Image (spheres, coloured by chain):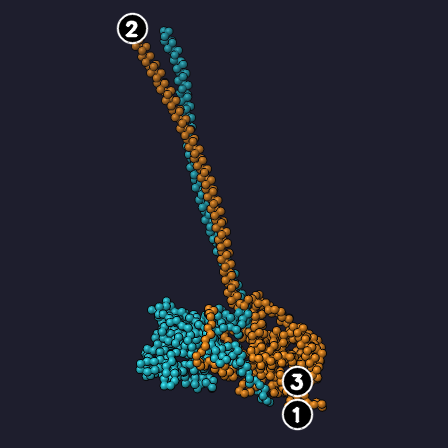
Amino acid sequence: MDLQKVAQKNLEGYVGFASLPNQVYRKSVKRGFEFTLMVVGESGLGKSTLINSLFLTDLYSAEYPGPSHRIKKTVQVEQSKVLVKEGGVQLLLTIVDTPGFGDAVDNSNCWQPIIDHIDSKFEDYLNSESRVNRRQMPDSRIHCCLYFIAPSGHGLKPLDIEFMKRLHEKVNVIPLIAKADTLTPEECQQFKKQIMREILEHKIKIYEFPETDDEEENRLVKKIKDKLPLAVVGSNTIIEVNSKRVRGRQYPWGVAEVENGDHCDFTILRDMLIRTHMQDLKDVTNNVHYENYRSRKLAAVTYNGVDNNRAKGQLCTKVDTVDGMSPLAQMEEERREHVSKMKKMEMEMEQVFEMKVKEKVQKLKDSEAELQRRHEQMKRNLEAQHKELEEKRRVFEEERANWEAHQRQEQQKLEASRTLEKNKKKGKIF
Amino acid sequence: MAATDVDVFSNEEKRNLTLGGHVGFDSLPDQLVSKSVTQGFCFNILCVGETGIGKSTLMNTLFNTMFENEEASHYQNGVYLRPRTYDLKESNVHLKLTIVDSVGFGDQINKEDSYKPIVDYIDTQFENYLQEELKIKRSLFNYHDTRIHICLYFIAPTGHSLKSLDLVTMKKLDSKVSIIPIIAKADTISKSELHKFKIKIMSELVSNGVQIYQFPTDDETVSEINASMNAHLPFAVVGSLEEVKVGNKTVRARQYPWGVVQVENESHCDFVKLREMLIRVNMEDLREQTHARHYELYRRCKLEEMGFKDTDPDSQPFSLQETYEAKRKEFLGDLQRKEEEMRQMFVNKVKETEAELKEKERDLHDKFEQLKRMHQEEKRKVEEKRRDLEEEMNAFNRKKVAAETLSLSQPLKKDKDKKN
């Protein structure tokens, strides 16, 4: 469509398309929702407990033990799918956990299986998106990665930094301070400041809350930003405190309540992750991380026809891609280039050919002219000789004629004198 | 985009768990809705119908606004499509509305190709979207979607049946766009005639295999109303922006000497039904149908045309990479072959011309050989003549000498005679 002016129109009465959001709402509820959450961290940091607390359900239980209970020799990536329903809304929740992460003595490259898993989910989506027959496109891409930081109180460990640096451009990373009930509020503050400093220093891009037009929302977002990274506490047990039943951890010196904003940032995490930004996490995964993966993958294919994506585990720098062209459009472009190249080649060959032909024809003409000239010369020569001969003959004939005439004259004279003598002799006798 | 979310859950083992309290993900639809409201919506309507049948008036009436429109003339050379985009706002909902008008439709004497510009326009919008989707660096969420979501086909209120142009055009369009057939200027048909007309039209559509848009009945909240509306198709509409006072209300209507036809009166025409179905209930479904059905069909055909397949000869699914690699190899091989062909053609041409020129050279040579021979012949003749002349000269000289010798002895005889 040609770019045209888009006119602003004011409606003079109720039309009814303001119901569009309701229509969208209705359809989305009917379709149901999906969300994939990844939890990463060393054993014993309370990952399973936190998940159970977040979703108020026994995702991890004796029957389905959490990652720290499944001791592995190497880092595995495993997923559990659960279907939960609330208020008519159905959610298919996939929790991806990584047992064995950071638990070995030598943890070099322990992030590799995780990166491979994320990439393979992107690859699956890319393949199903690129099929000719597209039916269902199940979205199993990782929408969010909760990274658990041990509450040392000092700073990030080298493993933490390595992991986040390698994953921040592939997935939404939300770092959490685990088991925050081992830090006092002041220690926690310091710790958070230190972590944020280090994150800034290493240019790690953790998940950012989007700006909105709403003033109120922006203020809330700012408050959350000041508390990053969130320090959380989880619990599988319900305790009675002041005749209220709460989730908490019972200590001899008191109860650390999970949902108490003064005790930890759990409610902030839950509200942000589930109640307000779940959709945004999915959108950022789709529009940013997935698109990055896709453009890198397609650029490698088109440029070399060979899979250049061996640099999977390496730190990703700026994405180098062809200027916004689809591989098919690129082939089209190449085809056009080739056509013009062929035309040029044809023209050149034509020119060379013409030139050579002209040369040869010229040569032929020249030799013809030369031969003609020689022939002319010889002819003239011959004619000259002819003429000379004619002249000679003429002279000779003339001479002969004269001599013969002279001879005849003499003869006649002689005849005449002879006759006279004869007559004289005859006359004398008388 | 919500439209690409999964329809069917995968077959992995899923546990159903009960929640021990209010988690809060029931706000997910609200999160989705607020996102789409911020982004704004987009809707594209195509109006197909003869000149003067009331397309522009109906659009104005539907959207309660005067869209700028010059009246079209009947003397267009062919059919062309005129899209116009407007930014509308209602409550907090932004709608980017594009109305595409088919100008000149039905005016030509030969209408065989009338449907082509319409089909081409629809395909072009699909193509543009496909190209964007296939780009390496793409921004689909920012993309202004121009694909046609609904085609309102305006049927002339003859009261008898569909024109053959209508059948042909709708048949060509039904696989590319959702069609809602509309009986225009319905205030010229009486109620009983209308009833018969509707039945005739629907049966003709069915017998000719034309697929029109059915309002969806799978969602319980709207299935009832959609099902009942399906039975009223095609909608008989009247459009007007003029206001007439009826009773103590001012309504939009057309004033005739014999009465007032009220646009929003359901017993006068089906305008309200159309507005309800098109805008208030099924707008989102129409957008979804266009994307999930018509666009996918176009895309599938286009890709198959270009030689893409989903499985290789062994029925192993191709990965995207393999497909592109194979395509690319084929493509490069093709280019190589073309180059070779051209080179070969030149080699042949050169050979031919060389042979020609050689022949010419030989001919020239022969010609001059011949001339040389002729020349030799002439020379010989001249030599002969020269020899003859020489001989004659010699003979003459001999004669001369002989005669001289004779004449020398003659005078002696004379003297001798004289002495006697």
* Nearer to the camera, B203 or B145: B145
Residue where numbered disc 3 is placed: A264
Look at the numbered discs 3 and 1 and tell me whether their residues touch, using CB distance below 8 Å: no
Please report, as a chain letter, where disc 2 is located: A
Residue B153 seen in render: no
Q: Residue at x 60, y 81 (%)?
A: A220
Q: Residue at x 36, y 86 (%)?
A: B247
Look at the numbered discs 3 and 2 and tell me whether their residues touch, using CB distance below 8 Å: no
Q: Position of residue A11 (x, y in %)?
A: 44, 78
* Nearer to the camera, B2 or A60: B2
Q: Position of residue B184 (x, y in %)?
A: 36, 78
* Nearer to the camera, B144 or A225: A225
Residue where numbered disc 1 is placed: A241
Residue B271 seen in render: yes
Residue where numbered disc 2 is placed: A429
Q: Earlier in the sequence, mark 3 or mark 1?
A: 1
Please report, as a chain letter, where disc 3 is located: A
Q: Amino acid at mark 3?
A: Cys
> Chain coloured orange: which letter?
A
* Nearer to the camera, A326 or B40: B40
